[in-house]
Amino acid sequence: MKRWVCILLLGLVQGLWVYPALAQGVNAFVDRDTVAEGETLRLVIEVSGRGPSSDPDWSLLSQDFQVLGTDKSNQVNITNGTMEAKTRWIVTLAPQKTGSLTIPALTVGDQQTQAIVIKVTEAGAASTTGATPDIFIESEVKPDTAYVQQQLTYVLRIYYAVTPHGPQLSDPKAADALVERLGDDRQYTTQRGDRRYGVIERQYAIFPQSSGTLSIESPIFSAQIPDTHQQSNSNNFFGQGGFIGPDPFNSLFQTVRPVQVRGQPFQITVKPRPSNSGGGAWLPAENLTATESWSSDPPTFRVGEPVTRTLTLKARGLTGAQLPELPLPSSADLKLYPDRSATDTQANTGVVVGQREQKIALVPTRPGTFQLPEIRIPWWDTQADAPREAIVPARKITVTGVPAPSTPAQSAPVQQQATKNAGRSRGTERGR
């Protein structure tokens, strides 16, 4: 028994001696040589024999690809006393443009891989086999030109023919612009070619803050999807690896793969405020109205009794914060007590609707007939590309009752209170 153990140990030691002398070779290949824009592919590099002490320089890939992840593994197989070692890197790549792209030769230890050419088709385009992408994005911006601070509507649609896992979606970005999401996502289905797609639609409002060219950076959708491509081609890539038993890398490829899909970037021309837009606040909108309401209808005015007037600005295409404070009339016959104005913004079919509401308590100081002046709010009609005005008409009011006491009379209660305080003070002194 001891003799067989010694023979076995000797065989293992001999195998270890052979290991450094094993012939080394490097092989590189991809799981797909044709992908749609936004899809990912895997670059596999295998080294037979003792692997290098350091990883290849992945920065050489950055010219045309984004490296989404790398995975390294070492495997040793012993067959009939012969040891076979392999080092393998699996690199997930996201192409950064369409066309024919080259994965450059990479240095692995003292060897180099062969360059690999892949083809990247436009998103949504059929491949050479007639297949359509599993996931792609379509986007649009309306209108294609706008005034500074005018709302742009950015619409993003994600099409998916397979179920994405762990989806993540960034927002569009634009320098010197406000970006706000509009409402909730819409979900529906549609047919593209011979495939049925689920669709997620999301909308954003973008408000450029300066004139010139507005660059809108496209959102990025990331997820994991079933790796149907690798399932159909797994034997081509890993059936010749010489492994004993099931290949763990095949199992990895038969599960899910990452995708990273980019939306379309846009360049929008932003025009400055027109010279004939008048003074005051700049209000580019599809529509703007100014209205008034009263605490009683019709309002009744009596000397010394407050009546609340509510002025409301409402604009389609502007947020509530963009709407200005309303001017207040000044009159010696009316005392005004304004509350703090309240703003609100809501989304309505892809367009924001902003509102500013101002409540003012009016207290007449004498009877008579008075006129509240009209209120004019200049704004710019973006649909007609013309100046407009929102108007609250002038209003005549009739006040009844007796005149309010004059200023000296109004101070009588204060004087009375002072007299009482003085009396209490004298009583205290007498108590002493």
Image (cartoon, helix red, strand yellow):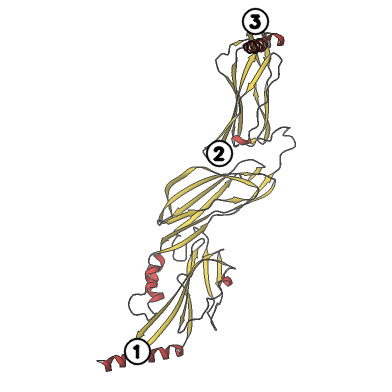
Which picture quadrant has residue 383?
A: top right
Q: What element carries label 3?
A: loop
Task: Give the mark nearest the N terminus, 1 or 3.
Answer: 1
* Quarter of the picture holding the N terminus: bottom left
Q: Which mark is residue 402?
A: 3
Residue 216, image x, y percentages: 61, 51
Taking the view exactly as shown, the residue that stands out farthest to the right is 275
Q: Which of 261 and 167 is in front in this view?
A: 167
Mark 2 nearby-residue class (10 Å; few <14, some 14–19, many ≥20)? many
Q: Do the residues labelled 2 and 1 touch (CB within 8 Å)?
A: no
Of marks 3 and 2, the one in the foreground:
3
Q: Which mark is residue 130?
A: none
Residue denoted by label 2: 351
| Residue at x 56%, y 70% (from the top left corner) | 61
Is 252 drawn above or below residue 16 in the view shown? above
Q: Which of 133 and 187 is in front in this view?
A: 187
**Mark 1 vs mark 3, CA separation in Å:** 118 Å
| Residue at x 59%, y 37% (from the top left corner) | 319
